[in-house]
Image (cartoon, rainbow, N blue to C red):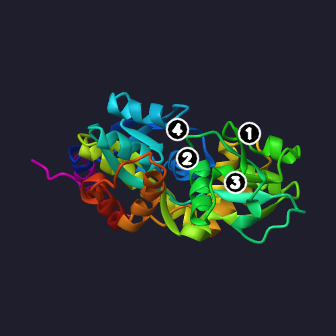
Amino acid sequence: MKPLRPALLAALLACATPLPALAAELKATVSQAFQSMLYLPLYVAIDEGLFEKAGIDVTKETAGAPSVALSAVISKSAQFSIHGPEWTAVAASKGAPVNVVANVVNGAAVWIAAAPDFPWTDVKSLKGQTIVTGLMPTTSTSLFLKLLKENGMSKDDVTLTQVALGTEPGPFLAGQAKVAVMYEPGLDQVVAKGMKVVLGFPEKYGPYAFSAVSARKDVDPAVAQAFVNGMQAAIRLMHAEPARAVAVAKREFPNLDPAVVEAAVKRMMSEKVYPESVDITKAAMTLGLDTQIALGNLAAQPDYATFVRRDFITKAVAGN
């Protein structure tokens, strides 16, 4: 019997050896509360093919509300949801088998904007003013009420004009109020019209668990690890090549002024709203949930050791 030629032997061995999956073998659905610029790490992971590289095919759905997104996870119609971790903490406190597996937004992504002629000196400047803010329950208004309390004031010291999330620029720019509490990209939409930023919560609070990925406690570990790996790769890419993150944001929000999109992403990058990794520190989680405790939305802090799945986070950070 003639010996196999080297080239033929190599070809046979290649056929006999399992190849790494080029197409994702695992599948998952992620339910986001809203299509939000805050969730840019998710969009980067999807648009840049980073989930596929992690071995998972991810389908994104938009629930329309945090509670609906989390309900999809609890009912097992989605493996993951993205929204404020306080929703997960409240559900867990009532017995729901859910916890947090990755960071998405690590800064209190809320700002106070004012008309250019508004005489701002400090928070007490707001006394007696009409303030446009998001319809409760929402973190922007929650943080604003907490800020008033910290400065010896209450909601009775101002007149709140609560509007649907995302519509804050309308009444503000129409002159119905001199001050507004805003998320991005609404903030940079009004800045482009001449309004000024007078206070930024990211700078005031530092690391703050604002939005996170939640999952059931019995989530398939392989699926969860691949998903968290993809998110970690996306966050790394955003910091290494911010221009690619901006390009993804422009594709995901085609109806917004590209200049506003770029300004919003750059602001959130520079003010550390987007995290440095999928890790969520105990201090950041405690601070984020303290806001909800202070407002009576959450009775007590969850046990960090069981509420945050550090096993997935640690492996993702080490591998990326």
Secondary structure, mark 4, is loop
Task: Tell me, for residue 33, which label it has, or none.
Answer: 4
Q: Three-letter amino acid code at disc 4? A: Ala
Q: Three-letter amino acid code at disc 1? A: Thr
Whichever of callouts 2 and 4 sits on the residue coming sooner in the sequence is 4
For the C terminus, the quadrant is: bottom left
Residue 294 position, x and y percent, is: 46, 55
Whichever of callouts 2 and 1 sits on the residue coming sooner in the sequence is 2
Give the alpha-carbon distance from disc 3 to disc 2, as whole Å.
Answer: 40 Å
Residue range of the region highlighted in magenta in the rendering: 1-12
Left or right: where does residue 144 sit relative to residue 6?
Answer: right
Comparing 317 with 113, the one in front is: 113
Residue depicted at 64% across the width and 39% down the height: 135
Contact, mark 1 vs mark 4 (Cβ under 8 Å)? no
Task: Tell me, for residue 40, which label it has, or none.
Answer: none
Residue depicted at 56% across the width and 50% down the height: 142
Task: Tell me, for residue 167, which label it has, or none.
Answer: 1
**The quadrant where residue 200 appears:** bottom right
Give the alpha-carbon distance from disc 2 to disc 1, as whole Å.
Answer: 23 Å
Give the alpha-carbon distance from disc 1 to disc 4, as whole Å.
Answer: 17 Å
* Label 2 vs label 1, nearer the camera: 1
